Amino acid sequence: MVHLREMPDHLREALINQELPEYGDTPWVTPKPLDECRVALISTAGLHRREDDPFTPGAGDYRIIPDDYDMGDLVMSHLSTNFDRSGFYQDVNTSFPIDRLHELAEEGVIGSVASRHFSFMGATPPTVMEPIARDLAGVLKADNVDAVALVPV
Amino acid sequence: MGGLAHYLEDEGIPTTQIALIRKHAEEIKPPRALAVPFELGRPLGAPNEPEFQRRVLRDCLDLLERESGPVLEDFPDDPPGADVEQEGWACPVNFAAPVEDVSDQELLEQTLLQEIALLKPWYEESKQSRGGRTNYGISGKAPEEIPAFLASLVVNREDTPSPFGDEKPVHLAFKQMADDIRYYYMESAIARPDGRVTDLDIGNWLWGETTLGKVLVEIRNWAMESEHPGFKALAPTAMVPTHQRHRTIHG
């Protein structure tokens, strides 16, 4: 396994102890009860539809993943070579739990699944990401999304 | 990831998230985070383990019911199979030893073409076993179009023209075609159902036992010292995985 604890020491230390941006106080919004929430997924795995442009270095943009898209055609063009991809090859849900989210909606754990999900390519500098993320919040509201689950890679 | 949570929550969207590196969540303090003890690339733990994946997602979503935050909780369990000893995973195809003479462009190209041809039936079988799913296709080039370009990059370095002409700079062409061909090899390598195979197993084979690995290491070796801004930017972290960098000159 390419687990953190099995990475070469100097690389693991560099990853864990990298300088992180400051985001200030933690904001807090009280959501609806979970079983009434319409939930969207946001991934930072560099996922997109096969027909979309791949991600490019330094990109802060995102790709839309419509909920009714055939997830078998979802591809990953994240630039990093430093995380496991074999799990994603075998099962999309290893990094993008779309089937699990639908099951939780069917079971009534969450209210419903949003009509669109989103993917960024992670490790984007905050100055680049902030305006895009704030704009995305408006898009989510327009789709009546009550909560998002953020899934890193 | 935690930054996105800050911005979205600040705009009024409640967020919850999975955290693969606990220390980062401790420092960034997103509103709600579930720290998981999984390897990078597998935020839900393991492939084809729906029950386990559902528990992870459920626990992550349950954080939305906490009354105040920031919330940082731990998922308690290692992924299924984490304690199983690997039993000698092997690629379905045995290759000859990687090419020794990397100055012979024609030999490199022909050897790569041969590797691709040998893998092809396994790639197709692997793809079929996943209902036609493949990550191949980022670059827009067929596998057989890639060896000539990679062989030229080993020998002619930055002077190699982009196969896309003015449409795509040469370093991006390299990144996308190199990733595509790695996907091709890796997907072929997991054709035989094994379930527990990881990037490390496949990486040890691809980077240690194939001519493709040798070619990509050679390109990384010169790219680390290149003045070409595109290659220079990609070389440190976007060419060779951490667990295989010991094969390169610069580590």
Image (spheres, coloured by chain):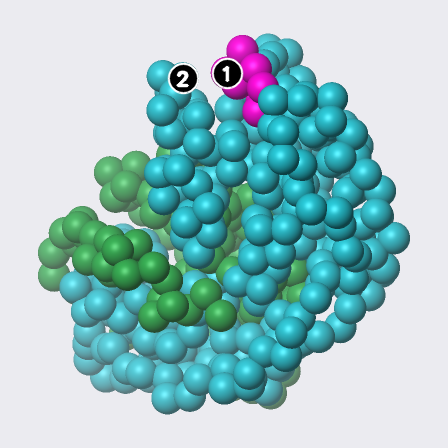
Chain colours: A green, B cyan
Q: Position of residue B59 (x, y in %)?
A: 41, 84
Q: What's the distance in space between the residues labelled 1 and 2, CA to CA?
A: 7 Å
In the image, residue B216 sits, relative to residue A34, either above or below, namely: above
Q: Residue B74 vs residue B128: left or right? A: left
Tell me the SS state at disc 1. helix
Taking the spot 69% from the left edge, 46% from the top edge, the residue there is B97
Q: Nearer the viewer, residue B250 or A38?
A: B250
Taking depth in this image into account, of B105 and B216 the one nearest to the observer is B105
Q: Earlier in the sequence, mark 1 or mark 2?
A: 1
- Tell me residue B17's x, y (percent): 37, 68
Marker count (numbered): 2
Give the quadrant of residue B91: bottom right
B195 left or right, relative to B77: right
What number is the disc on residue B158?
A: 1
Q: Are marks 1 and 2 in contact (CB under 8 Å)?
A: yes
Q: Is residue B121 visible?
A: yes
Instruction: Please report, as a chain letter, where disc 1 is located.
Output: B
Numbered mark located on residue B228 in the image: 2
In this picture, which residue range is highlighted in magenta? B153-159
SS for dot 2: loop
**Residue at image coords 58%, 39%:** B214
Q: Residue at x 33, y 75 (%)?
A: B35
User: Label 1 amino acid?
Assistant: Glu
Quadrant housing residue A96 = bottom right
Name the amino acid, label 2.
His
x, y (%) of residue B242?
A: 41, 52
Marks 1 and 2 share the same chain = yes
